[in-house]
Amino acid sequence: MPENNEARLQQIASARRAVMQDNRSATDVLVDGWSDRSWIDRSWIERSWRRCLALGHRPDQHVQFNVLPPQAVRRAEESSQALLLAARPVMSRLVRAIAGSRYFAVLTDAQGTVVGVDGVIDRSDRRATLITRVGVDLSERAVGTTAIGAALAELQPVWLHRGEHFFDDTSCYSCAGAPLVGPDGKPVGMLDLTGIDAAERPELKHMVVQSARSIEDALALAQPHQLLLRLNWPGRDFGTGHEGLLCLDADGWVVSANPAAREMLGHLASAHGPVHASELFASAWESLFDVARKDEASEVPLWSGLTLQVLAQAAGRALAARPAAPDARMPLKDVEAGLIHDAVRECRGNVMAAAKMLGISRATVYRKLGKRPPSA
């Protein structure tokens, strides 16, 4: 869509007046005039505007972009270490793809607090500096309708342009956002791409969704596990980036899963406690470990009567080492170590390259892995 499309901006302005001044539905204004996509698919914007109005916000009031107190910022950073380790290499690749677009990447925790940024950020522009400080609160309650607040509130990918933001102060931004779901199925944060006075690029929503899926996969794989099950429907190829990831311990208990696996396995998505492989697959769960030794995909029946294609891969060298009791809650240090091990493997043992990918020092990599760096 051309930059500064006047008809598009006028439609947004009409929708704002309908909701914020006339107490009408934005659908009444836009349902017949929306040219590039159905307004029904974007009704979340009106829901967000109405939540902001219910909080007592007014579009013309100034946004403070407050940073949390230092102690709260430290807690947010500490609790987001696993997320940051999983996101940094993905964000690094992402910003290379958007380098010429005048957009940059923002990572927040589940409360909308900024914990990481990447990309070309014009620090001379106060509007960019305000929203890219680690610890700034970009939740819907604090800064109104944005891709960050809306993605976390609606738990769906969003695209937001200029006046679709609630406050006048934020109408310079255009942004795409996608929520991030952790290995236990709970939201852990969101990934955002933001531009300032930039051309509208709704295709960035597709890009940010793909990157969010990569982060979710990395978080699932970082949980210590004995068996990785890659899941797909029969006839679908593996390695396309759309498969489910299900991690089991040596006793067959689920320790992590990505959102795709939860969609494929209905019982896993609805469960409120620990889940065993025997509750998911209508075959002996021990046979899944045998499948791993074949190094080829097998079709495995589900209790629902459906069949999944499963590619099983053993983690580590020993499947015989069985923990005394299954426990899906792993210490943060184990999650960090798993992510660092993965980065070192991806870089073929090059610790310096792995450290650069993760955005940490070489010494930190060695320290987290419990090793001493080689002497100079």
Image: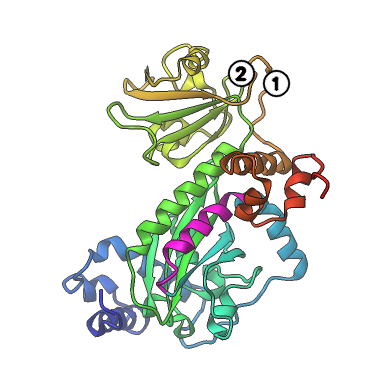
Residue 34 lies, in percent from the top left, at 21, 71
| Mark 2 Cα-neighbour bin, 10 Å: few <14, some 14–19, many ≥20 | some
| Quarter that holds the N terminus | bottom left
| Mark 1 Cα-neighbour bin, 10 Å: few <14, some 14–19, many ≥20 | few
Which corner quadrant of the image does residue 112 belong to? bottom right
Asked if residue 280 is positioned above or below residue 244 in the image, the reply reads above
Residue 120 is labelled as none
Q: Specify whether 169 is left or right of 324.
A: left
Q: Secondary structure at mark 2?
A: loop
Task: Pick the residue in front: 150 or 178.
Answer: 178
Q: Is there a contact, CB below 8 Å, between mark 1 and mark 2?
A: yes
Which corner quadrant of the image does residue 77 belong to? bottom right
Residue that numbered label 1 is attached to = 323
Main SS, magenta residues: helix
Q: Residue at x 50, y 31 (%)?
A: 246
Q: Look at label 2 and name its amino acid.
A: Asp
